[in-house]
Image (spheres, helix red, strand yellow):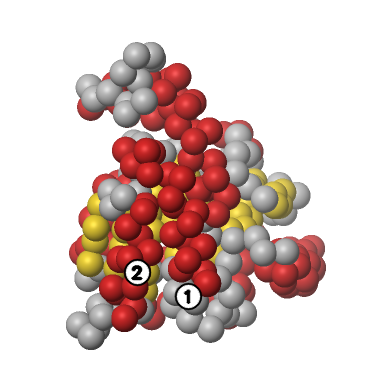
Amino acid sequence: MKFIIVTGLSGSGKSVAMDALEDMGFYCVDNLPPALIANFADLCYKSQQSIEKVALGIDIRGRKFFEALNESLEYMDKSNYKYDMVYLDCDSQVLVQRYKMTRRNHPLSNETSILDGIKKEVVIMEPLKKRSNIIIDTTRLKPKELISNIKSIFNEENIDESAPTMTISVQSFGFKYGIPMDADFVVDVRFLPNPHYVDELRPKTGDNKEVREYVMNSDISHEFKDKLFDFIDFLVPQYIDEGKQHLILAIGCTGGRHRSVTFANYLYEHLVQKGYRVFKKHRDSHLG
């Protein structure tokens, strides 16, 4: 059975994620009081109706019940009920703009500003973020990109139930647009051959065969790839042993279009072959 809990900051895309899961055949329940999660899990796992895919949405609207949430999650752990917790994160200023565009109030901003409400929510939701094994930063994601990420993560063909529960995110980015705020490990590949200076390659990205071949047309590139893979192969099991739920590996070049995308793709493929649960995002490949 697949049991997913979707949570995160208000305005970060929970409704979009839940809709995507529903389209994938999940039985979705939004804003179930946390005190009822344990009973609901019992019903799902012990039911004779063979419920195979369930997704629960939990957000700040259920804050009065948060003290019961840890008890429910601990009960699921003790009962050996496997579940994934997806936390949707987003930059505060971007959330402010989203609320202004929709002309809606933040759930905690009735007597204060939207930004102050968001800051309060970040503090309240931090324990859930730490407990989540999948964290998706939607700051620069369009709804269709978030849907694509959700479908990629929970595509049944990509799910190995025997694999470690930790989820690995591989993300390419451009240093000129800033380092991803939630990255655990940052790799700088700006020393590699740069397709930006080749006119016919400049408009393309690292998803293109010609760009990849140009980047890898160097002994240094191949040596670096081998050393990077060796280091990541050593690093990941250490994080798993420490109980880390979500690891974000960020690979950056100047603009985030060519070299970083090339190596993010290679690293993603390598980790998939190793049997890890991985998804990737090219944050800035559409820019510049």
Residue 1 percent across, percent down from the top left: 35, 79
Q: Which mark is residue 183?
A: none
- Please report the residue visible at 22 percent of the width from the left and 67 percent of the height from the top: 27
Q: Secondary structure at mark 2?
A: helix
From what the image shows, is residue 233 above or below residue 11? below
- Please report the residue visible at 60 percent of the width from the left and 34 percent of the height from the top: 178
Left/right placement of residue 99 relative to residue 89 reads: left
Q: Which residue is mark 2?
A: 41
From what the image shows, is residue 169 above or below residue 268? above
The answer to the question of whether label 2 and label 1 lie on touching residues, with beta carbons closer than 8 A, is: yes
Residue 251 percent across, percent down from the top left: 64, 52
Q: Secondary structure at mark 1?
A: loop
Q: CA distance from mark 2 to mark 1?
A: 10 Å
Residue 67 visible? The answer is yes
Residue 198 percent across, percent down from the top left: 58, 49
Q: Which residue is mark 1?
A: 79
Q: Residues within 10 Å of mark 2 (few under 14, many from 20)?
A: many
Residue 190 percent across, percent down from the top left: 71, 47
Q: Nearer the viewer, residue 87 or 154?
A: 87
Left/right placement of residue 243 relative to residue 138 reads: right
Left/right placement of residue 118 relative to residue 41 reads: right
Q: Residues within 10 Å of mark 1 (few under 14, many from 20)?
A: few
Mark earlier in primary sequence (2, 1): 2
Q: Report the amino acid beneath label 2.
A: Ala
Residue 196 found in image quarter: top right
Q: Report the amino acid beneath label 1.
A: Ser
Q: Nearer the viewer, residue 213 or 69?
A: 69
Q: Nearer the viewer, residue 71 or 182?
A: 71
From what the image shows, is residue 250 above or below residue 24? above
Residue 264 visible? The answer is no
- Please report the residue visible at 49 percent of the width from the left and 36 percent of the height from the top: 124
